Image (cartoon, rainbow, N blue to C red):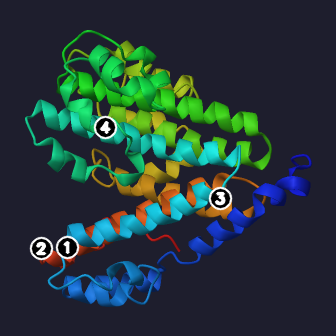
Amino acid sequence: MYGFEAMTFNIHGGYLEAIVRGYRSGLLTAADYNNLCQCETLDDIKMHLSATDYGPYLQNEPSPLHTTTLVEKCTLKLVDEYKHMLSQATEPLSTFLEYITYGHMIDNVVLIVTGTLHERDVQELLEKCHPLGMFDSIATLAVAQNMRDLYRLVLVDTPLAPYFSECITSEDLDDMNIEIMRNTLYKAYLEDFYRFCQKLGGATAEIMSDLLAFEADRRAVNITINRQVIFIGTELTREDRKKLYSNFGLLYPYGHEELAICEDVDQVRGAMEKYPPYQSIFSKMSYGESQMLDKAFYEEEVKRQCLSFEQQFHYAVFFAYMRLREQEIRNLMWISECVAQNQKSRVHDSVVFIF
């Protein structure tokens, strides 16, 4: 169907594909989540997780356990698995795996720059950074006063350097410019990752095109309805907003034209319901409501990522596994916070079941 990659894929990719499918079998099931939602304390959560793949990472943690510690240890497991896969990978899989971390790099850059703008301690900010998005010169981000300094002093030697071509201005960094920078970087990153997957061809290109197109469309919707703190009615014109949309995806180009002129959630809904894959997402919400949109998008994303495991001989399973594990960590963080704050009535509000 896709050519002859099935004949040679296992020479370099067979071992790691087996490894990642083994990792996937360790993801928490609906039964695990139901048990976790019944827990009364964080120690109960720890006891239940001790019977899962997270057990070795939590076994030496003393009581009382804190939510941040729980999330940190679960993230450490993901990082260890990623490093193992990267250390065993050859080209082009190693480059593909590196692409997966660029999104975390962008988030870390924005976190450090925003925190510095609000005079937060750099060491405290570094502790909040995602470990998959760390790079050598990240601590020196605090010295940058504008985009040009940010690029020249720090980011020129990182993988993010090519994405900064549209961001380099002499304007001082403020909350507005930082959010525009975040979305411009994400746009460039997604387009670059999309082009790379197209070059790989075969099943990888087909499945990753679908996953990345969904990500691009979701970001376009989030930018439009003010979920990323890009404000409708401020200095951002409709044309400026449209420049932040990725140049691929199901919504490109006609959906972007409609989204660019939307002023509220109901107008966004009207534009999105013309596209059958997104019609089901918006049908779960009542008119004027946007609070549940994130969860609806996450549920659709999880469904697509699980489907990528139905085929063999492609790299999309690595991307899908990383995203599924990150979703699992978000679920555990939400459940832990609800238990810690005695808000068990809300525990199901943001949990996205994976299996």
- The crowding category of the residue bearing disc 2, from other C-alpha atoms within 10 Å (few below 14, some 14 to 19, many at least 20), is few
Instruction: Name the residue that disc number 4 marks.
Output: 138
Instruction: Name the residue that disc number 3 marks.
Output: 88
The spot of residue 61 in percent (x, y) is 25, 81
How far apart marks 3 and 1 lie (CA) works out to 39 Å
Closer mark to the observer between disc 3 and disc 2: 3
Is 137 above or below relative to 168? below
**Which numbered disc, 2 or 4, marks the residue that appears first in the sequence?**
4
Give the amino acid at mark 3.
Gln
Label 2 sits on a secondary structure element that is loop
- Residue at the extreme left of the image, as rendered: 119
**Which numbered disc, 3 or 1, marks the residue that appears first in the sequence?**
3
Instruction: Name the residue that disc number 2 marks.
Output: 341
How far apart marks 2 and 4 lie (CA) works out to 33 Å
The spot of residue 147 in percent (x, y) is 29, 18
Closer mark to the observer between disc 2 and disc 4: 4
How far apart marks 3 and 4 lie (CA) works out to 26 Å
Is 56 above or below relative to 8? below
Residue 83 shows which numbered tag? none
Label 3 sits on a secondary structure element that is helix
Tell whether 221 sits left or right of 65.
right
The spot of residue 209 in percent (x, y) is 65, 41
- Residue at the extreme front of the image, as rendered: 136
Q: For this rendering, which residue is in front, 162 or 259?
A: 162
Closer mark to the observer between disc 4 and disc 1: 4
Tell whether 96 sits left or right of 137.
right
The spot of residue 263 in percent (x, y) is 30, 27
